Amino acid sequence: MQMYMKTSQMLAHKNEIKDKEQRKALNLWASKGYIGSIIAGTGFGKSRCGVLAIGKLLKEGEQALVLVPTTQLQDQFREEFIKWGYEDILPQVEIICYQTAYKFSDTHYAIVVCDEIHLGISPEYRKFFENNTYGKLLCMTATTPEEDEYRAYLTNLAPTRYKITLDECVALGLVADYEIICIPVSLTDEEQVAYKKANNLFVHSKYRLGGFDAFNQAKLILANKVQGDKGAATMFYKAIRDRKEVVQHTSSKIIKSKELLKKHKKDKVLVFSGTNAFTDAMAEELKGLSYHSKKSKKQREQILEDFKDSKNRVLCSTKALNQGFNVPDASVGIIAGLDSKALPMIQRVGRLLRLNKDKIGVIYILYVKDSQEEKWLKNAIKSLNNIKWV
């Protein structure tokens, strides 16, 4: 009983700190005219910030809009309004996916909250901000976009008013601590041949410019949106795709994942893959659940329930769990598919780090040694601490 009371007191104290930081973020946003972004590591409680902003500011007769990237987050935001005591204003709040809202025109909202804004500022979705009006705008994401164009657009649309990194959240006790262990794996002889072929294509491409812009430029050329050498763009795009496919699908990642599951026999484990096909393969080999965008909403809901109820302790996902999901009791993660962006990495690490954790979250990252994937990994984790290279 005494231990329970001590744990409850610690949790209450951490909740007080989190509440204070959330209100600090909202006050900074309010002091700048109610237009701006909150950049906060996963686990900070950005969804609550959005609910509080609407709940405190929305007046009778006004309409508010919450923009989210997935239908699952639509349901989650409705639950958040109820959880924090604002169920009565839900009739005044629309919760819409970016994929729908960009078609809106000539609508006005007293306040717009954009969750996972990095997904809502792609060129096609920007039409919402160009074709509609709003009084107050709150944008939220885990880290500043890395692409120059996206970062500039967000800065112009909603300048950063509050920023806290994942490690700063850990230091304040807002989320549990973590340890990242990077484990190298090797390609089979057949996979090495395929990788070398794809890498040679990349090396000899005229679009080998580095960074995000080269890849995006090639895509624009292939989509006939800008002028350019289509042959060279095709070669470059194919090289990137083929090279990534080899490292993301190597059989050695399945073998190593099986070894790690044996090490953590009593833990719930999240496994992140690079493609839906490999997620399905991992789930089959690891005797786990497969969760990705190709599953129906009903299937995804049942899969999460089975995982939460411990009917299965292994949940394999591609990108569908990256945004906004709180997965209870998962303290071990295996990342078997990655790219060079820091945001997906922070989101995946954050899936394991929640306020009620009583132990360190352990994240294993499997990468192909001496390949492009090793370079991607180093860039993706450059803003994180507590990293061990095996």
Image: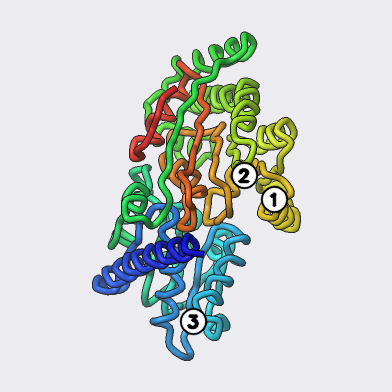
**Residue 227 seen from this side:** no
Residue at image mark 1: 310
Mark 3, secondary structure of its residue: loop
Label 1 neighbour load within 10 Å: few <14, some 14-19, many 20+: few
Q: Which mark is residue 250?
A: none
Few, some or many C-alpha atoms within 10 Å of disc 2 (few <14, some 14-19, many ≥20)?
many
Residue carrying label 3: 63
Q: Quadrant of residue 276?
A: top right
Secondary structure, mark 2, is strand
Question: Which amino acid type corresponds to the residue marked 1 in the rendered image?
Answer: Ser
According to the image, label 2 marks what residue? Answer: 268
Which quadrant is the C terminus positioned in? top left
- Label pair 3/2, CB-CB below 8 angstroms: no
Q: Residues within 10 Å of mark 3 (few under 14, many from 20)?
A: many
Pick the residue in front: 338 or 136.
Answer: 338
> Cβ–Cβ below 8 Å for labels 1 and 2?
yes
Vertical side of 4 occupied by 91: above or below: below
Q: CA distance from mark 3 to mark 2?
A: 41 Å
